[in-house]
Amino acid sequence: MEKKVRVRFAPSPTGGLHLGGMRTVLYNYLFAKQNKGDFILRIEDTDQSRFVTGAERYIFDCLKWAGLEPDESPIHRGNYGPYRQSERKEIYRKYAEQLVADGFAYYAFDTPEELEKMRQDFKTGKNPSPQYDHELRNKMKNSLTLGEDEVRRFISEEIPYVIRIKMPEKELVSFNDMIRGEIHFDTSLVDDKVLLKADGMPTYHLAVVVDDYLMKITHAFRGEEWLSSAPVHILLWKYLGWKKEMPQWAHLPLILGPNGKLSKRDGAQFGFPVFAMNWNDPKNGEMTEGFKEKGFLPEAFINFLALLGWNDGTEQEIFTKEELIQRFSMERVHSGGAKFDYEKAKWFNHEWIKRKESQDLKPAVRNILVEKSIAEIDDQLLDKVISLVKDRCTLLTDFYDQSVFFFRTPDQYDLTSVQPKWGESKKLFFSEIIRNYELNTDWSATVLETNFKEIAAANKIKPGEVLSTFRIMLVGGKFGPGVFDIAAILGKDNTIQRIKKALTIF
């Protein structure tokens, strides 16, 4: 019987969730749903020195906003918990000790000062950064160089130690990457990584293998920066007797910014978000803007994110989540870096806003208006406004500038555009417009436009000479949708009041 697909995203709660992390989530989610499998979120918090308060909650909030919630996690309970590595501490020691007993790992008692001395003493022109490897381990203080009695004494006296993997010399380690194909490593080039730290916590290398095995993970997708760690992990699967259970791996390409790998610094420099949602760093009080707060729809966010390194082989660009689940294929993920284009990301958002029903956009738009101190918002008016202006909005936050004049009479006008051509004839024209509009029983945009043009013709004025002035009277400047559409939505009383107010100022 074929195994049930189980994939995982395993972030560290150390800060904001950037595009690279969110794309890893998305690809895991799509693969799991396509194969009717499970998507697990595991918190890798073994490095307590880097733990940031609030970061775990933030991760869950980001996934919820994007519509990518896991099936199992610390808050979505499953049968393979605990889902925080800090709560699994005792599990890892057992396997680390097993590796030592089987001769695949060893105790290392070197102090930080002794490690630094090693880096200085063995530095050469050919080897400027010596590592704790197969060549140097025999010159260090560990259970390979010390007698058994001394090792037992050190441990009984609670002298701090770590457990390191004993990397073999000149062994070729290979695996098949779902994106990159067959990959080979020479173990002589890899140092003896720490598996268990002095505080009893595992490093990523041990924890990821043990957890993936115990949680029955079938496929592991992670960033290409972890490719260099693959030989250590492959050997651990082998040494622990689990080689047949090892997941299929795929190492995802980097997301590139203007200066190489996309970073928070790029966002600050070029004015675009790199995190899914706003992240307030409790350590330094620094706030980094997110795509959500910038005004992105979650549908647009996952749409452009999916195409950062993948395509389905067609020209299609707009995908629903359901379509992505159907079409996604790890084999079509590119091995080269994917360039992030913020203008293209905004294009996706604009397309999604246009496709959305006004009813679906209403909660977000209402929130934006309320945040800008527009307290009283008529529900029916909001429906009409969203329908009229949504095609003009690239970001959700654009709805304020594109619609504020529907809810608030302008208190400033673009007088520089009005006054050079303003005169008695124009004033008389708008006085006649007021009289005509007051008698109107049909307040549709078509009738308003017809009446406007007829009065202009009767006064021997070209409509173009007064249209922009009419717009400025209603909205304050030369912007917004069709002016007669604006008047139709504002209603008779509001439109006439605005013309009268403007006549006292122009």
Image (cartoon, rainbow, N blue to C red):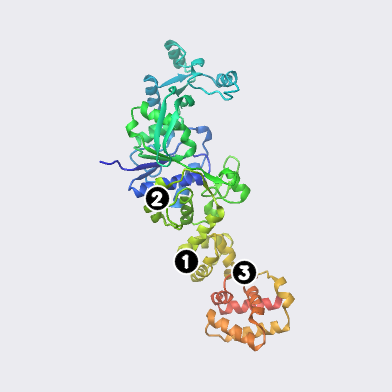
Residue where numbered disc 3 is placed: 479
On the image, the x and y values in percent for residue 480 come to 59, 69
Quadrant (top left/top right/bottom left/bottom right) for the C terminus: bottom right
Residue where numbered disc 1 is placed: 358
Q: Between 267 and 172, which is closer to the camera in this rendering?
A: 172
Q: Amino acid at mark 3?
A: Phe
Label whose residue precedes the other's in the sequence (3 or 2):
2
On the image, the x and y values in percent for residue 473 come to 65, 75
Q: Are marks 3 and 1 in contact (CB under 8 Å)?
A: no
Count residues near mark 1 (Cα–Cα under 10 Å), then give few for <14, some for 14-19, many for 20+. Answer: some
Inspect this view and state whether residue 395 appears: yes
Under tag 2, what secondary structure?
loop
Could you say which quadrant of the image residue 213 lies in?
top left
250 up-or-down from 295: above or below: above
Residue where numbered disc 2 is placed: 328
State how far apart marks 3 and 2 are (Cα): 42 Å
State how far apart marks 2 and 1 are (Cα): 29 Å
User: Image point 53% across, 58% down: which residue?
Assistant: 347
On the image, the x and y values in percent for residue 151 come to 44, 14
Question: For the residues carrying marks 3 and 1, which lies nearer the camera in this image?
Answer: 3
Quadrant (top left/top right/bottom left/bottom right) for the N terminus: top left
Q: Between 394 and 15, which is closer to the camera in this rendering?
A: 394
Under tag 1, what secondary structure?
helix
